[in-house]
Amino acid sequence: MKEITFGIDIGGTNTKFGIADRVGHVLYSGKISTTKFVKFEDLLDEVSALLREGLSNLGTAYSLVGIGVGSANGNYYSASIENAPNLKWKGTIPVGKMLAKSFGVPVLVTNDANAAAVGEMIFGAAKGMKDFIVITLGTGLGSGFVCNGQVVNGKHGIAGELGHTFVNPVGRNCNCGKRGCLETYVSATGIKRTVYKLLADHLEPSELRGVSFENLSTKMITEAALRGDVVATEAYKYTGRILGMKLSDTVVHTDPEAIFLLGGLSLAGELIFKPTIEHMEANLMPIFRNKVKVLPSGLQNQSAPILGASSLIWNYLEEKGKIPA
């Protein structure tokens, strides 16, 4: 009987879920809006129902061995989500316990970027690497650190929150309750905020004028920049400069071989990679210069969050042999 896992990625805008096998084939996938649900339980009930439907369509020759969940502020030790800044549900959500009760299999929960890092190590461009960082650029900014082949979870299970380190202590307000966090500048939401500031500061014509904040997307900004729009181009330069400078600080903590960028904002290609690399190199401690690669994720597709989350199970089985119930 073929072993499979469920992978669930709970994002600030959308929740993605699917069924994957041990070699990284996604056999079923789906996506629903995270924000349309009043209660977290309602979100989980719908995801569970859709996964059951997907599983039934696969036939009886499959055995579910576990469920991996990635989410902002996912705590690896408690299998819960704790006060995630980009989710409307606050407090501690015992998502692992809820899913284990529903499906009767072990559940592993972690930060969504940590899940992406495990996925990158098993199925992506970090195969064979022992020291690397994954930066997820979605509604917010997540980060997963791998040192000597192990994901860094920290004492309380929530290590690696690079998105909530300071860029400017009196800067933009953040959903976490602080001001000037990196993700308020470098994320899908952050670059939209930058565009609106630049529209106020610039007098040049821009095709982004007249587009509401709610309707503005990173895809629109990217396409405008590729057409030479002054505001859109400047927004990417500004975003890349901040990310590059912050990564120059981050490198000295773990001495990574590579930093992988994953998520919608990274799909802008050279628009984001060029200024990021330029400003990282310019601000690095000299001993690190030209040693750390900044690369696109090898999982840069719609299945990436699912593979990242489901890989938590495969990685644990490979290391430990058995997942604790």
Image: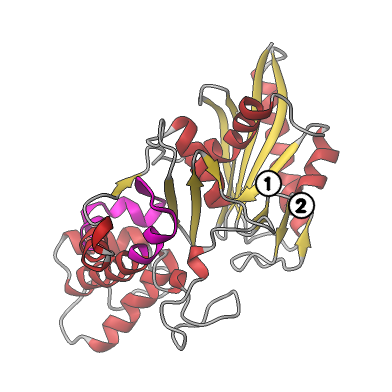
Q: Please tell me whether the stretch drawn in magenta is mainly helix, strand or loop.
A: helix
- Which residue was labeled with disc 1? 109
**Residue at horizontal 49 percent and vertical 46 percent from the top:** 146
**Quadrant of the drawing holding the C terminus:** top right
**Residue at horizontal 41 percent and vertical 71 percent from the top:** 190
Front one among 55 and 3: 3
Label 1: few (<14), some or many (≥20) within 10 Å? many
Percent across and percent down for residue 292 are 29, 50
Dots 1, 2 in contact, CB < 8 A: yes
Percent across and percent down for residue 261 are 37, 51
Percent across and percent down for residue 100 are 81, 39
Q: Separation of disc 1 and disc 2 at Cα?
A: 8 Å
Query: In the figure, residue 275 lies in which quadrant?
Result: bottom left
Query: In the figure, residue 50 lies in which quadrant?
Result: top right
- Which residue was labeled with disc 2? 78
Q: Is residue 57 visible?
A: yes
Label 2: few (<14), some or many (≥20) within 10 Å? some
Q: Is residue 79 left or right of residue 176?
A: right
Query: Is residue 212 shown above or below 115?
Result: below
> Farthest residue in the right direction?
101
| Amino acid type, callout 1 | Val
Mark sitting earlier along the chain (1/2): 2
Per the image, label 1 sits on a secondary structure element best described as strand
Q: Nearer the viewer, mark 1 or mark 2?
A: 2
**Residue at horizontal 69 percent and vertical 67 percent from the top:** 83
Percent across and percent down for residue 92 are 77, 62
Front one among 305 and 123: 123
Q: Is residue 305 visible?
A: no
Q: Which residues are magenta?
A: 247-275
| Amino acid type, callout 2 | Ser
Front one among 283 and 112: 283
